[in-house]
Image (tube, helix red, strand yellow):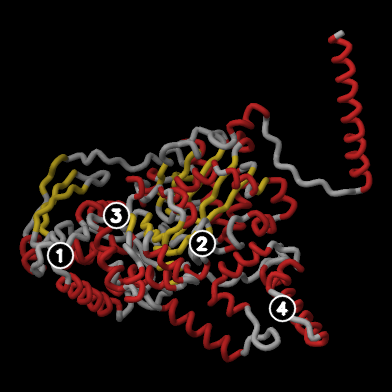
Amino acid sequence: MRSGRNQVAAMTQAEKTEPENGREKEKEQRGVKRPIVPAAIPEPLQEHIQSDYVIVIHPGSSTLRIGRATDTHPAAIPHVIARRHKQPGQTYSCDKWLLRDGLNKPESNEQRQNGLKMVDQAIWSKKMSNGTRRIPAVPEQARAYNKQMRPAILDHDSGVKWTNTSHNEEHFVGEEALFVNPADRYDIHYPIRRGQLNIHGGPGGSVTAVLTDLEVIWSHVIQKFLEIQLKDLKYYRCILLIPDIYNRQHVKEMVNMILMKIGFSGVIVHQESVCAVYGSGLTSACVVDVGDQKTSICCVEDGISHRNTRLCLAYGGADVTRCFFWLMQRAGFPYRECQLTNTLDCLLLQQLKETYTHLDQDICGLQDHEFQVRHPDSPALLYQMRLGDEKLQAPMALFYPATFGIVGQKMTHLQHRSQGDPEDPHDEHYLLATQSKQDQSSKASADRKGMPKPSMYDDVRSQGMDPERGHMMESELGPSQADGMGHSNDGEETSASLFSRKTMVSQFEGKALGLDKAILHSIDCCTSDDTKKKMYSSILVIGGGLMFHKAQPFLQHRILNKMPPSFRRMVENVEVITRPKDMDPRVIVWKGGAVLSCLDTTQELWIYQREWQRFGVRMLRERAAFVW
C-alpha cells in the first residue's frame, strides 16, 4: 500500500515540475532575459565559501596584508618587487622610499627650521605631569659626545646575506627584493605610493607596468604564504580594500586584474575606513589612518563613509623617519655612512624610529642608546649615541608638517568628482543631467498648472532610484561637492562662482594641515551636530604611523584644546582609541574585511567574473557598498 502511495506522490511531483520546466523553455524561446548567475562552485565547497574560500587583500604603500578571512592574522609582506634588467647595459633604477620630491628646494631648510621652532614652542608650553615646565635638552651637548664615538666590531661576519640571484630569476618579491644587491642588475619598484598606483615617468612607471608588478607580487604571495595554487583560485573569492579617496580608473584596473588575470571567481571592493570600523567593533567613528606614505581621515556613520569629510594628507610614518634622521644628524649621528638612497640604511632608520621615538612629555634630558648595523659583506658594528629631545620632536612633526621641509607639493587631497568613463554611460554625470532636465520640466509644468512643485524624492523615484539611495548619494557628495554639481538659476553655475570655488579648493589642498587640525576639519564637515558629537566621542586611530609611546593621551589633549568651545560643552568625553580590543592597529582594516565576508548583507555585493566580462565597470556602480 505504501509503495502505491509513494508512486502517486512521485507522479504528482513530476507533473508539478513539468509545467515549470515548460514555462522556463517558453520564456527562453520568447527571448526573456534571465538573471546572470554567479560562477558555479562545486557542491563540496558551498558550505565553506564564507570562511576558507575568501581571501582579504589590503594593499598598503609599504606593506601588503593578505590572508584567508578565517586566519587570525594576515601575512604581512613588504610591498615591493625587484625585476631583472632586460638588457646588459641598463641603468639601475630604484623607486624612492624615504626620499621624495620637494625636499631640496631653496626654501626647504628654512621651512624645516621654522617648523622645528613651532615644535619646540609646543613642547615648552605643555607642562609635565608633575606640573613643572620641561627643561629642553641642548643638542650641542649630544653632538659633542656623538662626534667622538667610534663603532665597536661585534663580529667580522654580520650574518646578513644578499639575496641569491645566481639563477637569474625574473623577479624577487617582498623581503628578498629588499636584500637584492644593487650590483646584481635588478630594478626595485614599489607599485603603490601614498595610497595610489605609483604612476611616474621613469622605468616601470606606466599603468601597465605597475599592474603587472601587482599581479606578480599578489600571485607569488598567494602561492608561497597561503599555499594556494593559481589554478584553484576559480573556487575562491576576494575582498579588495581601497583608500577612501580613490582613483576610479585605478580601482577598475585592479578589479579587472583580480578577476581576469589572477583568476578569482568573485570580488567585493570596500573602503578602508568602513572596514576599520567593522574590525574595531564600533558603529561610528572618525577614522584616522596614519600609514607609511599618507594619512587619511574620514567620518564613518552606520557603515557609510561621508564623502565630504574625507581628507588625505601626503605625509606619514616614512616622513617621520626621515625627519628623525635629520634631527639625529644635527646631534652628530655616529653612523656617518648612513644614506637615504640605501634601502638597508632606510630599514635601519625605520627600526631606530620605532625603538626610540615617543610622545611622552615626561621623558626629558639626554639619554645614552646603542644600536647595531648589520649589512651583507660587512662586519657587525655596535654604535653608542646620546639623544635628547630629538626623540619627541620627530613624531611631533605630524602636528607641525612644515618640519618635514616639503616645498611645492600638493599636501592635502580631497575626493573630486568623477571625470566620467566611456564604459559607464549611466554615471553620476548622466544622473545629474537627467535630474536637472526633469527638475526644469516639472517646474515649468507646475508653474503652468499652479500645482505644488514635486519633491526631491519624486524626482528620484521617477528615475527608478530608491529614495534612501538618493539620500545617501546626496550625503556622500556633501555640500562642497554637491555645489559643484548643482545648478544656479536654470541648472548652470556661473563661471565666476565656479572659478572662486575651484580657487578655494586648490588653496586648501596646497596647505599642509597638522594631524589634529585635519581631524577637526573632517569632523566639522559632518552635516549635523549629533554626528559631530558622535565623532568627537570616537576617534579611531589605525595604521602603523602613530604607534608611539603615549600617542593616545597626547592626541586626545590636542583635540580637546583645539575643538570648538560649543562642542566642548556638548560632548561628554572626547575619546581617542588607538588599540581597540588590544588589537594591532596595523591589521584592523584587514580584520574588518574578514568580518565583512561573514555578514549576510555582503552576499549582494559580490561581482562575479562572468558579470564583469559582460558589464565591466558598471558592476561597480551597481554592487559597490559606497556611492561609486
Tag 3's secondary structure? loop
Residue named by callout 2? 305
Q: Is residue 526 above or below residue 342?
A: below
Residue named by callout 3? 547
Tag 2's secondary structure? strand
Lower position in the chain sequence, tag 2 or tag 4: 2
Q: Is residue 136 visible?
A: no
User: Closest to the observer: 485 or 185?
Assistant: 485
Identify which amino acid the numbered label 3 is placed on: Met
Q: CA distance from mark 2 to mark 4?
A: 26 Å
Circle 3 or circle 2, nearest the eye: 2
Q: Residue 620 appears in which quarter of the rendering?
A: bottom right
Q: Residue at x 46, y 63 (%)?
A: 299
Q: CA distance from mark 1 to mark 3?
A: 18 Å
Q: Is residue 394 left or right of residue 153?
A: right
Label 2: few (<14), some (14–19) or many (≥20) C-alpha neighbours in 10 Å: many
Q: Residue 454 appears in which quarter of the rendering?
A: bottom right
Residue named by callout 1? 389
Identify which amino acid the numbered label 1 is placed on: Asp
Q: CA distance from mark 3 to mark 4?
A: 48 Å
Residue named by callout 4? 436
Lower position in the chain sequence, tag 3 or tag 4: 4
Residue closest to the far top? 1
Q: Is residue 597 above or below residue 535?
A: above
Q: Residue at x 36, y 70 (%)?
A: 570
Lower position in the chain sequence, tag 3 or tag 2: 2
Q: CA distance from mark 1 to mark 2?
A: 38 Å
